Amino acid sequence: MESIPILKMGDCLLVSIQVDMHDRLAMRLQDDLTAQVVKHHARGVMIDISALDMVDSFIGRMLGTIAAMTRVLGAETVVVGMQPAVAMTLVELGMSLDTLRTALTVETGMELLDALASTSAEGDPGDHPEG
Amino acid sequence: MITRRAEELPIAESLDIVRVRQAVRACMIDDGFSLVDQTKLVTAASELARNTLDFGGGGVVLIEQLLDGPRAGVRLTFTDHGPGIADLELALTDGYTSGHGLGLGLSGSRRLVNEFAIESSPGEGTVVTVARWR
């Protein structure tokens, strides 16, 4: 059965969506990702959508759901690489995606995930690197 | 107004939504629309095709490439013979949902196009027509 590959990199999972997703494939990604987060004890998930030339409310909702589900499982999700035309269309469509963390590139996405992982790992009282 | 090209596609399964998106994209590129214009109509087409499938029980979309004088346009007509919509005004309200989803399908699509028309009668089905002009 068709699926979107999920790569493991350190304690992060990396997904690059390279196909025009139909709805069942999107649902499958949701299931696969949550299962892999648990299996690998992942701390972060990065979803690269730079190859997507369209994000409709279904895909937008799926991304938000993935972020919410992985957060409950202890992993933050960052969506990277959204094309400008896609961002403009999403906002006009009425999707705010305000629960979703985004970054422009894979590099800044990784930095964001690192920062999130180190703040959530911060256990000592009085030790706050951000000040 | 001249119809340069017309094509009818079925909307019977979730893969058909992808096919509709691709066909609309091809027409927009053929007519020289900007990337933002392409993305807007393709996204609206995706929302409306999903409505046709999920709420109308499937149907068809007519994709037309039009010429109105010097202006090129792409018009999409989604037709289903499903239960229809009893309260159109309510269905067009942002956030109104018939159950699942975010309720952005109709109201959101309307913002992405230049022309929007909807006709529906309970028990007979729904016809949604949208167009985007260069």
Image: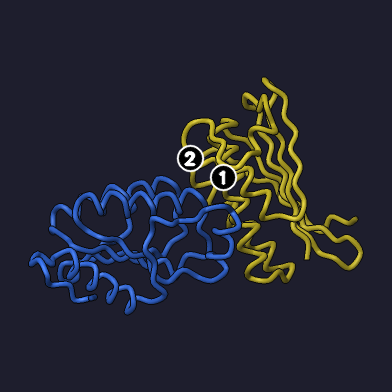
Chain colours: A blue, B yellow
Front residue (pair A126, A26)? A126
Mark 1 secondary-structure assignment: loop
Q: Kindly indicate the quadrant of the structure image that contains residue A81.
A: bottom left
Q: Which residue is mark 2?
A: B101
Whether residues under marks 2 and 1 lie with C-beta atoms below 8 angstroms apart, the answer is yes
Q: Which residue is mark 1?
A: B104
Residue B85 seen in this snapshot: yes
Q: Identify the amino acid type marked 2.
A: Gly
The circle on residue B85 is none
Residue A1 seen in this snapshot: no
Q: Identify the amino acid type marked 1.
A: Leu
Instruction: Name the residue: 47% across, 65% down.
Output: A52
Image mark 2: chain: B
Q: CA distance from mark 2 to mark 1?
A: 8 Å
Q: Is residue B26 left or right of residue B16?
A: right
Which residue extends farthest top?
A: B123
Q: Position of residue A80 (x, y in %)?
A: 39, 69
Please, is residue A60 above or below residue B38 in the view?
A: above
Please, is residue A82 above or below residue A90 in the view?
A: below
Q: Position of residue B1 (x, y in %)?
A: 90, 55
Which residue extends farthest left?
A: A124
Q: Is residue A130 left or right of residue B16?
A: left
Q: Position of residue A50 (x, y in %)?
A: 44, 70
Instruction: Name the residue: 63% across, 61% down.
Output: B25
Mark 2 secondary-structure assignment: loop
Specify few, some or many for label 2: CA neighbours under 10 Å numbering under 14, 14-19, or 20 or more.
few
Front residue (pair B99, B125)? B99
Front residue (pair A112, B26)? A112
